[in-house]
Amino acid sequence: MRDLASHIIDLIQNSIRAKANTIEVSFTESNQQNELKIVISDNGEGMSAEDITNATDPFFTTRTTQKAGLGLSLMQMSCEQTGGSISLRLNATKGLQIEAIYKTDSPDCLPLGDLSGTMSLLFFANPSINFEFSYSIEKSSFEISTKLLQQKGINIKLPNMYSALSEYIETNLNELFVTRKENSYLC
């Protein structure tokens, strides 16, 4: 994967295949710890404890249409290359939570990629799923969800909403990014 947004799309596709109707994606960036923590949590069918143990093995998959599952193993590799880690656990009620930690002061840290376009695409292409997206750097944060948009009467199914939503997310993220530490490799 070339960037973190590509990893996010790949992992969210797993949540969609697991029949999740709520998917939370959060980014928490710490200037003090030179870390980016990404958490993807869903209420899908989850995995067995044995499947969680094997999930980062590139030759393991729960899908019957292929013999390998590279998404989690590639993300684990990209985390570990920076000195970070990845962990998986079952949610308290239902579903799965993936937590990936990247060291942002490592030159091996992947760029963020097009997060605004990625999240807009996911919102737009999956209107029946409640996506909750948040990004925080220290005490500043930005949050958006499909549920909140619907409560405000915004119809994300309209064709012009994709670009409007993408621009809105990008503007808010750019306001956050000015507080990022200069030695961060995230861009």
Image (cartoon, rainbow, N blue to C red):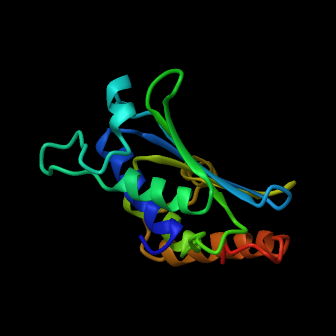
Identified at 62% across, 77% down, the residue is 167
Farthest residue toward the top? 93
Q: Quadrant of the C terminus?
A: bottom right
Q: Position of residue 173 (x, y in %)?
A: 71, 70
* Residue 82 in view, yes or no: yes
Q: Residue at x 56, y 69 (%)?
A: 115
**Left or right of 50, for residue 8:** right
On screen, residue 82 above or below 108: above
- Indicate the quadrant containing the N terminus: top left, top right, bottom left or bottom right: bottom left
The residue positioned farthest toward the left in the image shown: 65
Answer yes or no: is residue 25 visible: no
Residue shown at the point (51%, 73%) measured from the top left: 117
Q: Nearer the viewer, residue 52 or 128?
A: 52
Residue 65 at what x, y percent from top left? Answer: 12, 49
Can you tell which quarter of the image residue 138 is in?
A: bottom right
Q: Nearer the viewer, residue 136 or 100?
A: 100
Q: Is residue 69 above or below residue 171?
A: above
